Amino acid sequence: MDAIELLLTRQSDSKLTTPGPNLEQLDIIKQAALRVPDHGCIAPWQFIVVEAEARETLGDIYYQSAIAEQQEEKVINRAKELPLRAPMIIIAIAKYQAHPKVPRIEQVQSAGCSVLAMQQAAFAQGLGGVWRTGYFAQSPAVKNALSLNEQDEIVGYLYLGTPVVDCKKSAKHKAEHYFSNL
């Protein structure tokens, strides 16, 4: 797959199954994450790979966090199941570092770029992925359980695996609706 084809056909696949990335594929995914724009070369990211039984551990973290933060019953009831939706999850974290020339927003955007780069690397290798956020990306209890600092930001959970359905999605948006000239 060439770069233009990747950029124009990349899609999110929310229904994923085994196999997930093998070691060689995962290494390429990791390398892609490290090639994103990084003003000041400060590498404001951290990644946690969650697979196998660790997905249940993450589910327990979600569950305990939802209880501690008094979430709705439906959030509590789904918490343990969420990490089981794919064989692998990569938690992408913006590790904010005070810097005179690199504001926090640029550091968070860099970490966000890493999620897209990892998803594209997975897609280019025939895998599927979906970038999720939601309540558990914002939960102080989840951040605490993952030993993150208050200023750290979970920019996403990248679920990776093999798409259950091989269904190419058509483009929903038209460029002329979003681009204009000055």
Image: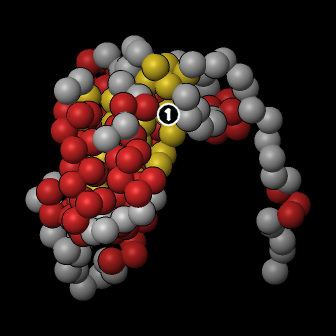
**Relative to 65, residue 159 above or below:** above
* Residue with the most extreme bottom position: 100
Q: Is disc 1 placed on a helix, strand or loop? A: strand
- Nearest the viewer among 22 and 149 is 149
Up-down relation of residue 163 to residue 175 (above or below)? above
- Seen from the viewer's position, the closer of residues 160 and 44 is 160
Q: Where is residue 153 in the image (x, y as percent from the top left)?
A: 30, 66
Number of labelled discs?
1
- For the N terminus, give its image quadrant: top right
Q: Position of residue 101 (x, y in %)?
A: 30, 82
Q: How many C-alpha atoms fall within 10 Å of the one at disc 1: few (<14), some, or many (≥20)?
A: many
Residue 90: give x, y in percent of width and height.
32, 40
The answer to whether residue 53 of the structure is visible from this angle is yes
Q: Which residue is located at x 85 percent, y 53 percent?
A: 174
Q: Is residue 114 visible?
A: no
Residue of label 1: 129
Q: Is residue 107 left or right of residue 60?
A: right
**Residue 170 x, y percent position in the rendering:** 80, 35
Position of residue 56 in the picture relative to residue 115 (left or right): left
For this orientation, the residue located farthest to the left is 147
> According to the image, what is the colour scheme of the structure?
secondary structure
Residue located 35% across and 53% down the image: 76
Residue drawn at x 86%, y 64% as measured from the top left: 177
Amino acid under disc 1: Gly
Q: Quadrant of the C terminus?
A: bottom right
